[in-house]
Image (cartoon, coloured by chain):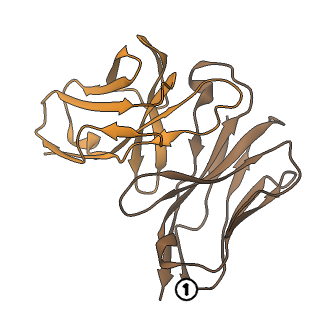
């Protein structure tokens, strides 16, 4: 079974704090993704990584950064958390290439910034 | 740019009945993938069914089937014999077929349809 795990299910942080969300996958996938899920907006891509140390901005990268030092691990960083970053964060991974249609998702981290 | 639209924020179905969730999309490409993902209350998103645009035959997975109308850019999900475990948020998603690398691999999601199953 493919497994994508996220470090926390629920997280409460204060405005201005630095926040780390971690994601680990065990399927040797090249691609890893961070999405943000908000009611009425669906899922929006924050950042994407296609290899170790390689990253690309998604649709809403402002206020976020990422790190991928090992193939299995992809971290999302909020340098200075703000209340408008209160949301559900979903990590996903997939193989690359034409047949890499399926993305496997983690359980999500519900982040509240107060 | 590609877009995906789900016009039904919420739907309800009686147990054992059939329900259809709607999805439309916009793209100028001829080859692509379409997906339905299910997100139960526990939040782990799982793939329900996929459709390759070059295939004319509608995909089927047990009680789940799609009605893919390429010319109309419509991709609806039919759930037959609904069960209580089908209650979830359902997302329609699009992905380009060709791997241009980078974030072109991304899934483009609709806003979701929350399905309730009444006993």
Q: Is residue B32 left or right of residue B13?
A: right
Q: Residue at x 71, y 55 (%)?
A: B24
On the image, numbered disc 1 is attached to which residue?
Answer: B15
Residue B14 to residue B45: above or below: below
Q: Is residue B5 left or right of residue A93?
A: right
For chain B, give the colour. brown
Which element is circle 1 on? Answer: loop
Toward the viewer: A17 or B59?
B59
Toward the viewer: B64 or A113?
B64
x, y percentage for residue B66?
Answer: 74, 62
Q: Residue furthest top?
A: A53
The image quadrant of residue B58 is bottom right
Q: Is residue B3 left or right of residue A82?
A: right
Q: Is residue A70 left or right of residue B53?
A: left
For chain A, give the colour. orange
x, y percentage for residue A17?
Answer: 12, 30
Q: Residue at x 50, y 41 (%)?
A: A104
Residue B9 to residue B92: above or below: below
Toward the viewer: A37 or B90?
B90
Q: Quadrant of the C terminus of chain A?
A: top left
The answer to whether residue A63 is visible is no
x, y percentage for residue A65?
Answer: 32, 21
Q: Residue furthest front?
A: A1
Residue B68 to residue B64: above or below: above
């Amino acid at each position: 079974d493919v497994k994508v795990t996220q470090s926390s299910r629920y997280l409460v942080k204060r405005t201005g704090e630095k926040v780390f969300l971690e994601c680990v996958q065990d399927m040797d996938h090249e691609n890893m993704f961070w999405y943000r899920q908000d009611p009425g907006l669906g899922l929006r891509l924050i950042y994407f990584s296609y290899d170790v140390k390689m990253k690309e901005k998604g649709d809403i990268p402002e206020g976020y950064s990422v790190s991928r030092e090992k193939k299995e691990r992809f971290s999302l960083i909020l340098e200075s958390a703000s209340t408008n970053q209160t949301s559900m964060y979903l990590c996903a991974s997939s193989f690359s290439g034409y047949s890499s249609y399926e993305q496997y998702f983690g359980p999500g981290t519900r982040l509240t910034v107060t | 740019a590609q877009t995906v639209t789900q016009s039904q924020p919420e739907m309800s179905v009686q147990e054992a009945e059939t329900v259809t969730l709607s999805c439309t999309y916009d793209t100028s490409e001829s080859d692509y993938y379409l997906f339905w993902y299910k997100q139960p209350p526990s939040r782990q998103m799982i793939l329900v069914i996929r459709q390759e645009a070059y295939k004319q035959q509608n995909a089927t997975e047990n009680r789940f089937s799609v009605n893919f109308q390429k010319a109309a850019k419509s991709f609806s999900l039919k759930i037959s014999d609904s069960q209580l475990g089908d209650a979830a948020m359902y997302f329609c998603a699009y992905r380009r077929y060709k791997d241009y690398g980078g974030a072109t691999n991304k899934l483009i999601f609709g806003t979701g349809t929350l399905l309730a199953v009444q006993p």
